[in-house]
Image: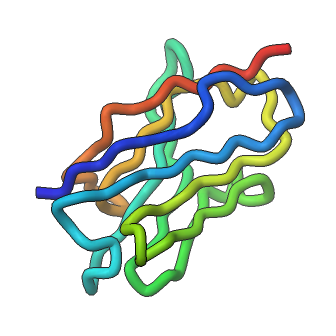
Amino acid sequence: QARLRESGPGLLKPSQTLSLTCIVSGASISANGTYWSWIRQPPGKGLEWIGYIAASGDSYRNPTLKSRTSISRDPSRNQFTLQLSSVTPDDTAVYFCARGNSYFGNWGQGTQVTVSS
């Protein structure tokens, strides 16, 4: 059973870059066939999938966010990272990391990110 925990700043100003790290235990992010995703939920709205990184290192991002996002990984630390550039108040949300790319079997508890001047 994978356990995931998000880590990163809770408050940013517009135009800054958000960087979140997901620390994984109980499973290897390099295990064949595994995928590791970022998902967010803005206040009062549904879940929005941001993108994933595969065990191979390949990544795929939501086209609506692709120009501002990058997802990377550090196998030596068993963690993966989301970067979202040029944030605006519309990026305010609870951000989750999860195992999977369409069905998500394990989730982190989520971290609140607020963008405000």
How many circles with numbers are drawn on the protein?
0
Q: Quadrant of residue 109?
A: top left
Q: Position of residue 99 (x, y in %)?
A: 30, 58
Q: Position of residue 101 (x, y in %)?
A: 37, 62
Residue nearest the observer in this picture, 21 or 66: 21
Q: How is the image coloured?
A: rainbow
Q: Position of residue 3 (x, y in %)?
A: 22, 50
Of the 4 image quadrants, the one containing the N terminus is bottom left
Looking at the image, residue 91 sits to the left or right of residue 1; the answer is right
Name which residue lies at 73% across and 22% down.
115
Extreme residue toward the left, this view: 1
Figure check: 117 above or below 11:
above
Q: Position of residue 107 (x, y in %)?
A: 28, 44
Name which residue lies at 33% across and 80% down.
30
Name which residue lies at 16% across and 61% down.
26
Residue nearest the observer in this picture, 74 or 36: 74
Name which residue lies at 67% across and 62% down.
70
Of the 4 image quadrants, the one containing the C terminus is top right
